Structures are given as C-alpha cells and as structure tokens.
Image (cartoon, rainbow, N blue to C red):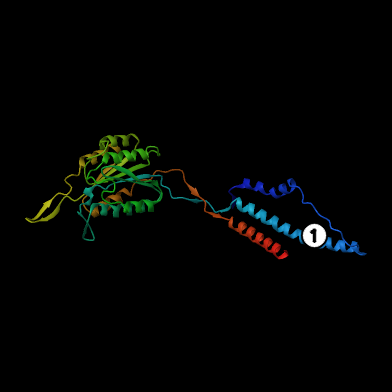
Amino acid sequence: MIHIEWPLLLLALPLPLLVRWLMPPKAVTRDAALKMPFIEELGQVSHVSMAANKNWPIWLASIAWVLLVLATCRPQWLGEPIEQAVSGRDLMLAIDVSGSMDEDDFFINDQPVDRLTATKRVATAFINRRLGDRIGLILFGTTAYLQTPLTFDRKTVSTLLDEAFIGITDDEPATSIGDAIGLAVKHLKDEKKNSRVLILLTDGANTAGEISPLQAAQLAADINLKIYTIGVGADEKIVRSFFGNRRVNPSRDLDEKTLRTIAELTGGRYFRARNQEELDGIYKLLDLLEPVEKDKQYYRPMKELYPWPLASALFLMLLLAWFRVRRS
C-alpha cells in the first residue's frame, strides 16, 4: 500500500493561488495601434493563439507544483508485515580480560593459544547462534564497563568482542567479578522478569571492585537475574626451565567456590572449562536455554517513492525554463 509520511504538507497545494489572490496584478500598458479594416477578425485569431500559448506553461507549472508538494509529503510503499524472530531473552555476556587471561593453556588445532583467544572463538560462535536474543557485552578486569548494550545486532557484538584484548579496561592484573555482576544488574533490572540471563566467564578470583561477588549475586537474585558462571583454565601445564620440565597448576587462583555459590544463589549453574572442547560444549549447553515468549514483533518493508515525483517536477521546471529562454 502507499503511505504518506507527512500528509499535512498537502495543505500547501493552494499556496500559488493564494499568492496570486493576495498580490496586486501587474499594470498593463497599452500602446497606440493602427486601425485596420479587418481588425475584428485579426483580434479573434490572435486571442485564440495567445491564449493557447499562455495556458500550457501555466498547466505545466501547476503540475510541477503538485508533484513537488507530493514529493515533499514523502510518499512510501509499504510491503506486507513480516514477523521478526524474537525469543524474548535478554542475554548479557561478561568476559574477563584481566592479565591472567593471557595464559596459553588452551589449544586450537594443536597450537597453544591464550584463554581470551579461545573464549572469543567459542563465544563468537555462540553469539551468532542466538537468533532472536538481545545480547549485551561486559568486559571486566580491574574495572568493569559496558562494551555493548542490549541489542539484536549480533554482528556488532561479535566484532566488539573480537576487538577486545588483555588489559583493555586497565593496566593492573586484577579482577572485579562483583562489579561486573553489579553492572549487569544495573542494565537488566528494568527488563522483563524471567527473560534475563548473565553468562560470566573468568579464570580467577575477585581481587578488585566496589562490591563483593556474593553481594552482587544477591542483588541479581532479587531481580530474578539468572547467572551462569564459567571457570576457565587447565588444571595442569608443563613448564620448561633450566632444571628441566615441571608441572604447574595454571588455575590455582580460580575461585570455584565463589563462582559455584553465585550460580546457586541466582538459579544458574557453574561450569568448568579446562580445554577448548569443554568450553565449546558449555556454550552448546547454554544454547538449550528455553526462550521466554513475548509479544510478536512485526516490521513492514518500506520503499521511498518521493524521488519519482521530485524528478518529474524538476524535469517540468527545466522544460519551462528552456521555453522561456527560447522565447527571449
């Protein structure tokens, strides 16, 4: 169907008539003429020809004005309503970007990579699968900040996650898990209940921030924000030194007890990812979250039509200008 975006501008159509009515007519000067015996017949012929010559520019100008006003009203063609895929879930990702995420105890294609690289690879695939969810991104180290607010634009979230790097939030090797949860509570508290989820991934313990993780978890529980926590890092790593190889635990700082308590307080679940395969399996399990129904949303494809009457009006005005130049 055709839709007029600004129909009130159609009131400008009689504007030329109003201007002509209000402005005084141009004075007509009469010059002396010779008397001729057939003046009456000549007058009839000249009257018809002059009327014909004067009327068609007026008609062209009138049509051009109508087309110009119509273009100004912004006509549009609206297609049939199309239902959008909306699950109704508001899903926030909180990713640890502190210095400890630089530990290269994960493997991709048998090549060692740091924890953040492995996380970005799996989380990006997870984001791309969440069709219909509104997704947001929080990055936290010593401080926590909102990298992406809730949006249906999964491509932007994936891009900003891919651009994240170790220490993007600060230079100190500290982790503010409580502040990350508090920031998620702040941005999700006004959304619909039973549709809010926070997925928090870290490899350490809370060593910075204004609020403790358990206090933040209680705030999350009060607004029915479900938190899924993921602890990343291998249990064992071989380190080569001058005295030979030795085995170390690169995840010795991981506070699994706190992460498990956060999940339990909010009705979520704690996951442990010791390698790339386990991390990928965790995000596939998170894909099974049941969406919460919301009102269906529709949009109508829209195509602007104003260029057609605008181009036609310009063509007619150019034609009138050419005619006047030729007459002069």
Give residue 316's quadrant in the image.
bottom right
Q: Measured along the vertical axis of the image, is residue 29 above or below residue 217? A: below
| Quadrant position of the C terminus in the picture | bottom right
Judged from this view, the residue extending furthest toward the right is 37
Asked whether residue 232 appears in the rendered view, the answer is: no
Q: Position of residue 211 (x, y in %)?
A: 27, 36
Q: Amino acid at mark 1?
A: Ala
- Write the residue at 32% across / 53% down: 163
Q: Nearer the viewer, residue 48 or 142?
A: 48
Q: Position of residue 226 (x, y in %)?
A: 32, 40
Q: Position of residue 65 (x, y in %)?
A: 67, 54
Where is mark 1, residue-wise?
Answer: 51
Q: Is residue 223 left or right of residue 13?
A: left
Q: Secondary structure at mark 1?
A: helix
- Write the residue at 13% across / 54% down: 238
- Write the residue at 60% across / 51% down: 72
Q: Position of residue 156 (x, y in %)?
A: 38, 52
Q: Is residue 113 left or right of residue 52?
A: left
- Write the residue at 29% across / 39% down: 179
Judged from this view, the residue extending furthest toward the front is 32
Q: Measured along the vertical axis of the image, is residue 141 above or below residue 120? A: above
Q: Is residue 267 left or right of residue 104?
A: right
Q: Nearer the viewer, residue 161 or 219?
A: 161
